[in-house]
Amino acid sequence: MLIVAALGGNALLRRGEPMTAENQRKNVKRAASALAALIDEGHSLVITHGNGPQVGLLALQSAASPGGAFPLDVLGAESAGMIGYMIEQELANLASHRLYATLLTQVKVDPYDPAFSSPTKPIGPVYDEATARQLAAERGWCIAPDGDKWRRVVPSPRPIEILEASVISFLVDHGVIVVCTGGGGVPVVARDDGAMVGVEAVIDKDLASSLLARQLNADMLLMLTDVDAVYVGYGTPDARALRNVGATELSGKDFPAGSMGPKIGAAIEFVQATGNPSAIGRLEDAAEIVKRRQGTWFEP
């Protein structure tokens, strides 16, 4: 079965953890172990991943350099290369009999997408409210609550086309496990002359993964994060985990725009377009989710 497996940025760097190379490597090893279990069971994988914490850190480092900050599309490509390198290496250490490749992926967006005037995508570290407001005033950031903390938020336009989809498909057909669409891919727009140029944004990884899964005709879209299922009333005493959901059952329900909302939207889009299942759950449960023993399943 061809599975597009999407790793959340917070699954690769746990919430509140210091963003160090050591912590990143430790969490990638954990992710690789979960993915290797799927490989050992004979599944073909295309692995995507988030980059919210990582691209935010690179943005801070870039802003502190004497030459000034690099744009988010370039930083997104940097973070995709860094994370892809680690995932590819750790997977090969666990399952050396397979072939692996990391591919930087351009994702076309609409230059007139309303997201450019309404940033919602959290990136970088978390701050207390006072610190976040001070940094926003100093650096011209948009900020928003993220749980009980605050983070920088940036535009997150909808993906329209995965430009390297045919290359990814070629690699999959030849038995390669591909790491791609890192951080939702590098956001690009078409100029009037047809040339592609990068834009200042971070594409939602789950929406991009759903689009990629549709372009690849994948058998399943699997979104792995740091919670075990989709919950109704999450964070309240009445919280209830959902196990099997019809494709339209959650349409119109209110879920956080910066986290679970895009995952649910991505799952529904994939199911409705293909008739194939999608699932959301905890990274460590990846193999059990595919067997329908854990997570939340979305079906027609």
Image (tube, rainbow, N blue to C red):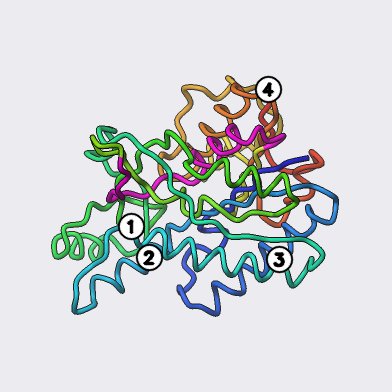
- Estimate the x, y position of residue 168 in percent, counting from the top left: 60, 46
**What is the spatial separation of the Cα atoms under label 1 and label 4, in whole angstroms?**
36 Å
Q: Could you tell whether 62 is left or right of 179 in the image?
A: left
Quickly name the residue at label 4: 275
To which residue does mark 1 refer?
Answer: 151
Name the secondary structure under disc 2.
strand
Q: Earlier in the sequence, mark 4 or mark 3?
A: 3
Residue count near mark 4 (Cα–Cα under 10 Å), binned few <14, some 14–19, many ≥20? some
Residue at the outermost front position: 193
Residue 144 picture location, percent across and down: 30, 50
The amino acid on which the numbered mark 4 sits, given as a three-letter code, is Gly
Magenta-colored span: 195-220
| Residues marked 2 and 1 touching at CB (< 8 Å) | yes
Give the residue at mark 3: 91
Q: Is residue 236 visible?
A: no
Is 117 situated above or below 90? Answer: above
At horizontal 39% and vertical 58% (from top left) the residue drawn is 76
Of callouts 3 and 2, the N-terminal one: 3
Q: Residue at x 49, y 56 (%)?
A: 104
Question: Which type of secondary structure does the marked residue at label 3 adopt?
Answer: helix
Badge 4 marks a residue whose secondary structure is loop
Residue hosting label 2: 125
User: Is residue 88 found inside the magenta-colored segment of the image?
Assistant: no
Can you say which quadrant of the picture contains the C terminus? top right
